[in-house]
Amino acid sequence: MVILKNEKLTAKVDIHGAELKSVVDNVTGYEYMWQADPEFWGRTSPVLFPVVGKYVDGESIYNGVTYKMGQHGFARDMDFEAVEESAAEKAAFGDDTALFVLTENEDTLTKYPFAFKLSIRYVLKDRDIKVIWKVTNPGDETMYFSIGAHPAFNCNSDEDVLILDTDKTLQVNVLNDKGALTDRVKEVSVGSDGSLPMSAELFSEDALILENEQIHEVTVSKKDGTGLVKVRFTAPLCGIWSPVGKHAPFVCIEPWYGRADRADFSKKLEEREYGNTLVPGDTFEKEYSISFIG
């Protein structure tokens, strides 16, 4: 476990999955992150790579070969290397930073046919944590992938409110019972102040899947005014999720570069909607931030 600490917050990141496991207020002792109780959901903030959501039938096809891989990919279940920072990196990012790296191995190549280097950096500054992803293609052919976040924050998912950076009605894509995207789009109303009250009904059809950059900021606002969390991102998609029917005491705010396949998708890896492409030697770099307000 790697610990980042300043005067205001203490954060813990596990090398297993490079997963942010805890963020605690140093004064109040409040824990912002869901603590992975398996009764509801046994994870806290998994990184989704090299797929977000599910392939149709758990399969992708590349160069005529079929590859099988589970939901959200394999990175969340692998041990990363915690990399020692260079003097230049410390100067650029400060002392409160941690870098984790994952590369392909024999097992990943049976599920996903590309060499890769996935770097995840966490930067703690004041009451914010910035998460920086870098995906590099060290191979000799074009690489296709998705990446996403899945952080879970403590709250009351039956009573608390989400504040979005829009007052427009949300167009929400709906999954079928196999986790594939259907053609059905439902509308979810948002208050004039961007408010979206949480409830069991809101999450009755699994995650809210928002395409086409409908939002870029979500605040988890508790009724008593404590434990506020704000997630900011530039990703084209966002998922908002709490487990169906469980009245779970957390909500996930999920910036995504990719999503589940449509139910009638061809399975061709290079044709996935919202997929990302890297030519040999190129690097994809994106980031999002979380503010732990109080």
Image: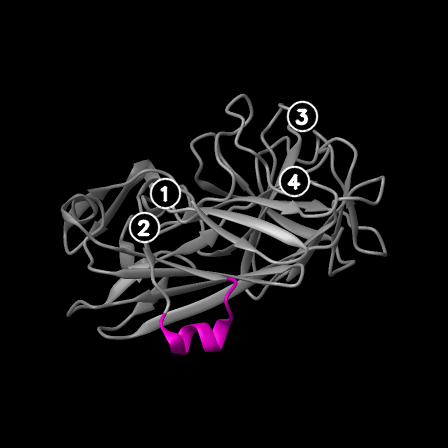
Residue kind at label 2, given as amino acid type? Phe
The kind of residue on which mark 4 rests is Glu
Disc 2 to disc 1, C-alpha distance: 6 Å
Circle 2 SS class: loop
**Rendered image quadrant of residue 158:** top right
Pick whichever, 59 or 15, lies toward us: 15
Question: Would you call the spot at circle 3 few (<14 residues within 10 Å), some (14-19), or many (20 or more)?
Answer: some
Figure quadrant of the N terminus: top left
Dot 2 crowding, Cα within 10 Å, few <14, some 14–19, many 20+ = many
Q: CA distance from mark 3 to mark 2?
A: 33 Å
- Span highlighted in magenta in the image: 86-96
Q: Residue furthest top?
A: 39
Residue under label 3, please give it: 247
> Is 171 located above or below residue 115 in the figure?
above
The residue shown at (37%, 47%) is 15
First-in-chain label (4 vs 3): 4
Residue 12 coordinates in the image, percent (x, y): 51, 47
Q: Which mark is residue 16?
A: 1
Tell me which amino acid carries mark 1: His
Q: Are marks 4 and 2 in contact (CB under 8 Å)?
A: no
Principal SS element in the magenta part? helix
| Residue 55 vertical position relative to residue 37 in the rendered view, above or below | below
Instruction: Name which residue type carries label 3.
Output: His
Give the residue at mark 2. Answer: 80
